[in-house]
Structure formats: structure tokens, C-alpha cells
Image: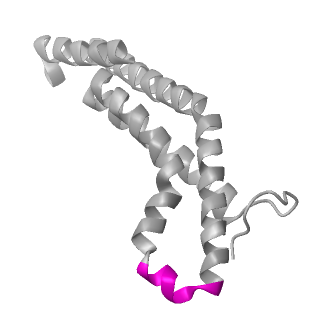
Amino acid sequence: MNNIQQLRVQLEKMFESMGGENLEHDAADILKELQAQLNTSLDDLAMQFATSLEPRITISVRELGDLLLNIKDIGNSQQSIQRNAVAVEADEVLRPLMDLLDGSLSLYAQSCEKTVLKRLLKELWKIVMRILEKTVVLPPMNDKSLPRGQ
């Protein structure tokens, strides 16, 4: 993906060095079409890569949901204790997902160009939110092992 991004940048520089908007329409259209194809390829690759992480994200979100359900069950019987430990419990609930993402995101930040990293983060965010919604907020009614959204 970094190579495609570099190619996209080089194509933009070439477009500018050839005259930019003053370039003949045919040549400008070809270069703009190539730029659009490279952008589409980057988006597609970012989506494929993020999708490859989906099973690991799903497992982490299920752990998160189980921890959240346990805290809810405890909280019903000990409301005053729960209020005092909200921050600790929130950290514990988010731990499975954050452990997965923290290690991965550090690696991606080191190895990806800024533009590529933004695309990856965007796709990962979509996947995490979709899985959180399906698993924790609105779990399937027929799966008894998942926590219920109240």
C-alpha cells in the first residue's frame, strides 16, 4: 500500500511538472484517471487488510461484551461500589479490544505512510463499530452465549 501511495504522489508530481491544469485535456484526463484508479486500489487494499483482521476483532469484542455483562450483573447488586470503580471497570471492559488494537496500531504507525495509515484506521474503525453494534449493542436473539443489549 505504501508503494501505491508513493506511485500516486509521483503521478501527482508528474502532472504538475507537465503543466498541471494547463496540460492538454486528453493527457490530463489520462493522468487523472490513473490517479483515481490508484486511489480506488488503495481504498480496496485497506478494506481487504482491515477485513482480514475481522475475526480477531470479533473475538476481542465478544470478550468485551462478556466483561460488560459481568459488570452489569455485579452492578445490579452493588450499585454504590460500582459507582466508585467505573473508571477501573471501563478499562477492564475495553482491555481485550485495546490489547489487540494497541499492538497492531503501533506496528501500522511505524510501517505505513500517514495517508495509508489514515485509510487503514478508517476501515478498522468501521469494522470495530459494526462488530460492536452486532455483538454488544444489538446481539442476535438466537445466540444465547452473547450478552443482551438492554
Quarter of the N terminus within the rendering? top left
The residue positioned 50% from the left and 83% from the top of the image is 81
The residue positioned 42% from the left and 81% from the top of the image is 84
Total marks placed = 0
From the image, give the main secondary structure of the stretch colored magenta.
helix
Give the camera-side residue of 83 and 24. 83
Position in image of residue 126 (x %, y %): 52, 47
Position in image of residue 9 (x %, y %): 23, 18
Question: Start and end of the magenta stretch?
Answer: 77-84
Give the camera-side residue of 23 and 82. 82
The residue positioned 11% from the left and 12% from the top of the image is 17
Q: Is residue 141 left or right of residue 65?
A: right
Above or below, comparing residue 99 to residue 17 in the picture:
below
Position in image of residue 118 (x %, y %): 34, 37
Magenta stretch: includes residue 79 = yes
Give the camera-side residue of 122 and 82. 82
Quarter of the C terminus within the rendering? bottom right
Q: Quadrant of residue 20?
A: top left
Above or below, comparing residue 128 to residue 78 in the picture:
above
Position in image of residue 119 (x %, y %): 39, 35
Res. 26 visible in picture: no
Q: Is residue 142 left or right of residue 113?
A: right
Q: Residue farthest to the bottom? A: 80
